[in-house]
Amino acid sequence: MKRILVLGAGFGGLQATIDLDRIFRREREIEILLVSEQNLFLFTPLLPEIASSYINPRHIVQAVRDIRGRRRFGFQRELVRAIDVSRRQVELASGTLSYDSLVVALGSRTDYLGVPGAREHTWDFKTLEDAVVLRERILDLCEHADHTADEAVRRQMMTFVIVGAGYTGVELVSEMHDFLFHYVVGRYRGISPAEIRLIVVEDAQEILRGVHPKLAKHAKKRLQVEGIEIRLGARATRCFPGGVEVNSSQIIPAETVVWAAGVRAHELVEALPGPHDRIGRAIVNEHLQLETHPEIFVVGDSAAAVTAPEAPRVAPVAIAHGRLAARNIAHLEKGEPLESYRYTSQGILISLGMNYAVVDIWGLKFSGYFAWLLWNAVHLFKLAGLKKQLQVAIDWWLAVVFPRDASIVRRPRRCKLCGTDAAQ
Ligand SMILES: Cc1cc2nc3c(=O)[nH]c(=O)nc-3n(C[C@H](O)[C@H](O)[C@H](O)COP(=O)(O)OP(=O)(O)OC[C@H]3O[C@@H](n4cnc5c(N)ncnc54)[C@H](O)[C@@H]3O)c2cc1C
């Protein structure tokens, strides 16, 4: 019996598993096993909408066992601790698993870029939990600011800094803007709109690096029209409770600093043998294999595939990698020549909050309401399963007709801000 082991049930790993299952469905001598630390698949493109109470967190995740349906691949919910490439074994909490072929699809992690205090004093935005916690943080601050008499303290509570103006930072700040200005204002009568500040701090001279300059410019203008402050050439140099220091000189007082600036490969990927790029991704050959270990394929955010132009770290690339890795494992099995990876852009869609998006797709670049409709349609289509599609579509519709949900689910604890009980 041979075992093909896939690590990580994200975009790349899940796609590889599903394709391997299809390719080898009649081969009873081949076991396909997916191992991931969580028993769900997270649709990350909709994470910013969780932070703004636009959609329900459960609606953008799907249990792996539901996705599996009648397929025959095995699934184990476990944390991978180490990969021993010389023994062809993976170490889990419950023991070791051996493999004949391995697909590494462990994604990426936040890189605090060595900025002092960033790890301790900023809010991460990568997982579903991060989004849920950030949502409650925003609401918690609103609850406090509403009855805080000191205007300066209130302003500090209502200042939100996002470090990093990539896709995540821009989509997140747009959602936060919608939530704060269209929901919070009016319901929290002690907070004036003039006291709410959203600031994006970006080291580069432009936002949305990698996006066509015309669209990036358009997006920047739109954010500024909405009143979001964009500070370019501004590097976060220190983070501390109550604020962030920029360019080693200027202090921005803010109770919430969200870190959306840096990404590094997973620790286990950095530990793989062979060359790595500057953010620790494993450099793979054109077939997505480790040059010294052809039985190991690395896909998605974990892989630096040598392509021109360089592929961005986005879901369609991870899916394409997963597909190719599955096909190449089958080719290896049959002694056939392997296929090479070629990056082709599937377009760029960036939501700038309710009713506005910028889009670069099928050779067309446009922005505005129709771009936003297209953004919605594409993301709804890409969500796995009719149930999730309906749930998200209904959430969107409900948000148009009814107010968003401002309930804080977690029970209060002593608040660091004002000494009273709070949800934080
Ligand atoms: C907030 C946010 C918004 C984004 N928006 C978009 C967007 O709009 N469009 C787009 O195309 N891309 C977007 N992305 C990027 C996209 O999510 C990634 O490029 C994609 O998820 C990469 O797929 P992957 O399979 O490499 O990794 P992931 O999808 O991250 O999957 C990694 C998997 O490995 C598992 N794992 C990690 N460590 C372990 C371990 N030790 N043991 C076991 N399992 C482990 C994880 O639980 C996860 O299931 C966004 C990302 C974020 C964070």
Image (tube, rainbow, N blue to C red):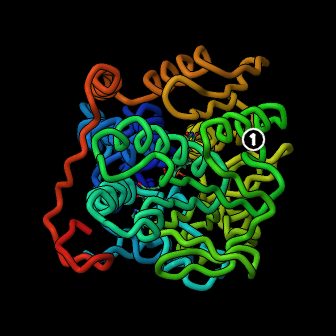
Q: Residue at x 32, y 36 (%)?
A: 55
Query: Considering depth in this image, is 155 or 168 the residue closer to the camera?
Result: 155
Residue type marked 1:
Ser
For residue 311, side relative to residue 66 (left or right):
right
The C terminus, quarter of image? bottom left
Position in image of residue 345 (x %, y %)? 73, 32
- Toward the top, the furthest residue is 370
Rendered image quadrant of residue 52: top left
Query: Considering depth in this image, is 417 or 349 the residue closer to the camera?
Result: 417
Q: Residue at x 29, y 47 (%)?
A: 188
Q: Residue at x 35, y 25 (%)?
A: 396
Residue that numbered label 1 is attached to: 340
Q: Above or below — where is 158 with respect to 250?
A: above
- Toward the bottom, the furthest residue is 116
Position in image of residue 253 (x %, y %)? 55, 72
Position in image of residue 283 (x %, y %)? 73, 62
Can the viewer see residue 366 in this picture? Answer: yes
Position in image of residue 421 (x %, y %)? 17, 72
Q: Residue at x 83, y 55 (%)?
A: 205
- Toward the left, the furthest residue is 411
For residue 373, side relative to residue 233 (left or right):
left
**Mark 1 neighbour density, 10 Å: few (under 14) some (14–19) many (20 or more):** few
Rendered image quadrant of residue 390: top left
At numbered mark 1, what does the secondary structure look like: helix, strand or loop?
Answer: loop
The N terminus, quarter of image? bottom left
Q: Above or below — where is 275 with respect to 108?
A: below
